[in-house]
Image (cartoon, rainbow, N blue to C red):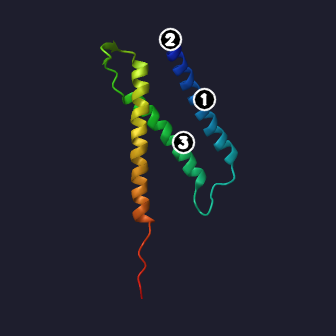
Amino acid sequence: MIDVLIYTTEALIVVAVALTVWSVVRTLRIRGKGGKRVNRIPVKAIAYGVAAALLLMLVLTYLLTDVRPMLINGKPFADAFWIRTAGMFVTTSLLLMATAAVAVVIGRFRYGYQKKKQA
């Protein structure tokens, strides 16, 4: 029964990664050479930058994750690939949430509502 769960998890990870790659490639291909700027905002550069930053973040968090064996439910777990993969997803998720929070704060104070002076 445990093997079924492991194989299902592996299949879901492969499908999720494949779908993500397909989605990024499709989005960047549809954008094509046109549509570099929308309302003077460089959307194409932002799209490429976000995709590259996410990929870099995933690779770095995978490589920097500690792979020391862990004791889980009283049993040692030393599979370096799965320890790194879990660490990559957890660390990347935390970094993305922190980045979103910082973006909200910056947006609030830089572009946020300002009190109008009453004459």
Location of residue 92 in the rendering, given as x and y in whole percent from the top left corner: 42, 37
Q: Secondary structure at mark 2?
A: helix
Say which residue label 1 marks.
Answer: 18
Q: Are marks 3 and 2 in contact (CB under 8 Å)?
A: no
Q: Earlier in the sequence, mark 3 or mark 2?
A: 2
Q: What residue is at 40 percent from the left and 16 percent from the top?
A: 79
Number of other residues with Cα within 10 Å of mark 3, as a class: few under 14, some 14 to 19, many 20 or more: some
Separation of marks 1 and 2 at Cα, in angstroms? 22 Å
- Tell me the residue at 57%/30% (across/down): 16
Q: Is residue 93 above or below residue 82?
A: below
Which quarter of the rendering shows the C terminus? Answer: bottom left
CA separation in Å, label 1 and label 3: 15 Å
> Element type at marker 3?
helix
Marker disc for residue 51 = 3
Residue situated in front as seen by the camera: 34 or 11 = 11
The three-letter code of the residue at mark 2 reads Asp
Dot 1 surroundings within 10 Å: few (below 14), some, or many (20 or more)?
A: few
Mark 1 vs mark 2, foreground winner is: 2
In space, the residues marked 3 and 2 are separated at their CA atoms by 34 Å
Q: Secondary structure at mark 1?
A: helix
Q: Which residue is mark 2?
A: 3
Q: Amino acid at mark 1?
A: Ala
